């Protein structure tokens, strides 16, 4: 009888050990997959957006600081006064006098791509319902700030972003390729709102719009810093560049 009881206990123990081990392994595997998914979302969606938010914030802060110090204008944005003039420029111009204006447009166009990517693929981010709602709200506010006075129209922003991506090659276009688009009047016209946006800013016009954009960028960036982890992206970049936060 004792031998039978011992055998039953031994068998039961073995089964329990197997079940517990299986449960623990399944739990670890699930957690590992969840971590991999979080890492994928951060690297594919959140970090690229964080990067271009910081790039745009820094460029706009730099522009406002220069305008404040140099008589109310930023001359590096004013080598042309009409987007149509840009299509007449040589490659040398895009690498010289025109570089500050065109590179400013370039980094903002890439931001529009990242913002639209988030909108289109929000369901893949697997954020909490609260975070989903907060992120799309913050992005919408940022988009609204860009279209102030009248700025860059709502539907033009994702159109610009889409033109920055080469689907067949699965990559964003380079600065050189962007310049070549602007040299063609038929393709440049789709970027005229963005070009005018920076020309007006260089003239010292509608600076409240820039301040509002920077505030909205900061709100999105702080949200992403919290969700993705890490320090304050904007604060760290400004400290590295030696420019005060505006």
Image (cartoon, rainbow, N blue to C red):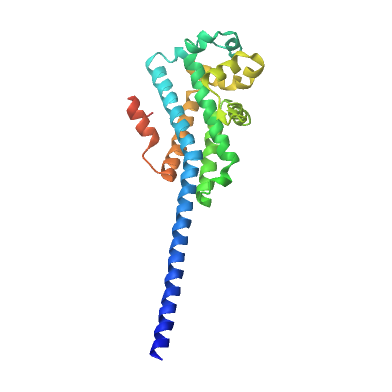
- In percent of width and height, residue 133 lies at 54, 47
Point out the residue furthest to the front here.
Answer: 3
Number of disc labels: 0
**Residue 104 visible:** yes
Which residue does the image show at 41% across and 81% down from the upper left?
A: 9
Image vertical order of residue 73 relative to residue 39, above or below: above
Percent across and percent down for residue 14 are: 42, 74
Q: Among all residues in the image, which is located at the extreme right? A: 186
Q: Looking at the rendering, in which quadrant would you find the N terminus? A: bottom left
Q: How far across and down, in percent of the image, does residue 115 sit?
A: 54, 35
Report the residue at 36% width, 29% height from top.
238
Residue 187 lies left or right of residue 109; in this view the side is right
Q: Specify whether 188 is left or right of 79.
A: right
Q: Nearer the viewer, residue 34 or 62?
A: 34
Quarter of the image that includes the C terminus: top left
Visible in this render: residue 243?
Answer: no
Q: Position of residue 165 (x, y in %)?
A: 58, 28
Residue at the image position 44 percent from the left and 61 percent from the top: 25
Q: Relative to the observer, which residue lies in front, 57 or 94?
A: 94
| Residue at point 36%, 33% (across, down) | 235
Identify whether 148 is placed above or below 67: below
Vertical relation: 72 (above or below) 1 = above
């Amino acid at each position: 009888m004792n031998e039978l009881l011992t055998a039953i206990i031994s068998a039961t123990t073995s089964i329990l050990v197997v079940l517990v081990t299986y449960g623990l392994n399944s739990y670890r595997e699930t957690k590992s997959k969840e971590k991999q998914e979080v890492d994928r979302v951060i690297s594919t969606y959140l970090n690229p957006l964080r990067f271009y938010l910081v790039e745009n914030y820094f460029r706009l802060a730099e522009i406002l600081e220069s305008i404040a110090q140099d008589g109310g204008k930023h001359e590096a944005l004013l080598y042309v006064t009409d987007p149509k003039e840009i299509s007449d420029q040589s490659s040398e111009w895009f690498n010289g006098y025109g570089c500050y204006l065109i590179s400013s447009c370039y980094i903002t166009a890439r931001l529009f791509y990242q913002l639209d990517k988030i909108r289109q693929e929000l369901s893949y981010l697997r954020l909490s319902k609260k975070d989903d709602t907060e992120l799309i709200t913050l992005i919408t506010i940022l988009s609204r700030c860009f279209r102030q006075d009248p700025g860059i129209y709502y539907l033009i922003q994702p159109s610009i972003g889409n033109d920055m991506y080469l689907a067949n090659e699965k990559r964003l276009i380079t600065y050189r390729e962007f310049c070549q688009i602007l040299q063609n009047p038929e393709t440049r016209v789709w970027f005229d709102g963005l070009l005018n946006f920076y020309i007006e800013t260089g003239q010292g016009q509608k600076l409240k719009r820039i301040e509002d954009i920077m505030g909205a960028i900061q709100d999105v960036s702080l949200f992403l810093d919290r969700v993705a982890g890490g320090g304050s992206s904007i604060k760290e970049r400004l400290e590295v560049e030696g420019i005060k936060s505006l």
